[in-house]
Image (tube, rainbow, N blue to C red):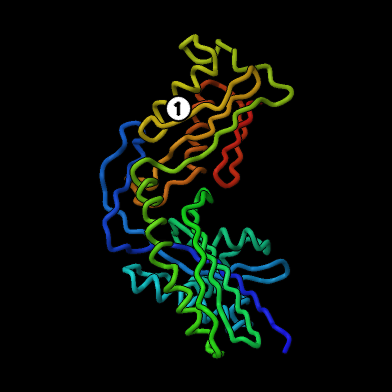
Amino acid sequence: MKKIKKQTTILLIVLNCITFSLVSQSTATSSGGQIKTVQPKIMVIPYTKEGEDIRTILEADVNRRIAIAKIKEAFDGRGFTTVDFTAKLKAAKDNNAFTSDNQTDIKSQIIQMSGADIYVQAEVVVDKGQSGTSVKLILTGYEASTGNSLSNKVGESGRFYADDIGKLASKSVESVAEDFLNVMQTKFTDIVNNGKSVIIDISFDAGSQYTMSSDKLGTSGLPLSDQLEEWMGKNAFKNNYHIQGTTDLKMIFDDVRIPLKDQLSGINYNPNKFALEIYKFLKSLSLDVKKDVKGSTIYITIK
């Protein structure tokens, strides 16, 4: 008999109620912020290939529904409280919340609406052949607002003469869940204590009259590059930042830490909010500025 392979890829998003206590930080990043308990949330959503619509994909594939349910059960069994993707998706569709038909935009909107701290991509490979059926599970966890990787693990069910994909998916989850969650928890705790990492790329428009050497901006009399470094030292979380390099036309901070949570509102703190703070600082120096955020990278262009 010819071996048949069926691959199903699923995207999960991690967040809600871990049983162990975590510590969050405040937007008062230079002081490290006040201490507050954080309970991450979890939501499971399907990953879609080109041509697939995330809004309808679960309706067409029972194996995806089974795999999502089994992975969700594994998180529930280890102290997580999960958010139901189908319910969130239905609410968003009923409220006409989607502003684009672009699948990447739709996924981002679902993640944002869920309030997720972490998302986990799970690739489920169902392999049927003469020697039996097996299910392989490849889990990759990411910090939601930056896309930085947190944990990567592969689990396998072993090969059985059975067609119960649910049971085989459960075996795959059981073989990998503990290690996956332990690694993810370690990385997440580091984010809680030390902030999450973003890259900041500051450059000049081709027609700009300014450079990093400009020293007539503001009242300090310092070159712009020095003013930017002073500001970063005061505003990066726990003063934690690193400069990759500076030229007269560009300055790159390749590892700036920002807080996980906004202490005042309790909502996720993301690169967009930090980009706004940089924008406001440069505007205070009477500079015309453009900002753009792509994943964990902030682009600032001075006109």
Q: Residue furthest front?
A: 131
- Image spot of residue 250 (x, y percent): 63, 24
Q: Quadrant of residue 38?
A: bottom left
Q: Is residue 302 visible?
A: yes
125 left or right, relative to 206: left
Image height check: is 128 above or below 183? below
Depth order, front residue of 158/39: 158
- In the picture, the quarter occupied by the N terminus is bottom right
* Amino acid residing under circle 1: Met
Depth order, front residue of 67/285: 67
- Image spot of residue 182 (x, y percent): 37, 59
Q: Quadrant of residue 210?
A: top right
Q: Is residue 91 visible?
A: no
* Residue at x 47% of width, y 53% of height: 150
Image height check: is 84 above or below 237? below
- Image spot of residue 130 (x, y percent): 65, 88
273 left or right, relative to 22: right
Q: Label 1: how many residues lie within 10 Å, few (<14), some (14-19) or many (20+)? A: many
* Residue at x 55% of width, y 77% of height: 135
* Residue at x 50% of width, y 82% of height: 168
* Residue at x 45% of width, y 57% of height: 118
| Mark 1 residue element | helix
- Image spot of residue 10 (x, y percent): 57, 70
- Residue position marked by numbered label 1 in the rendering: 232
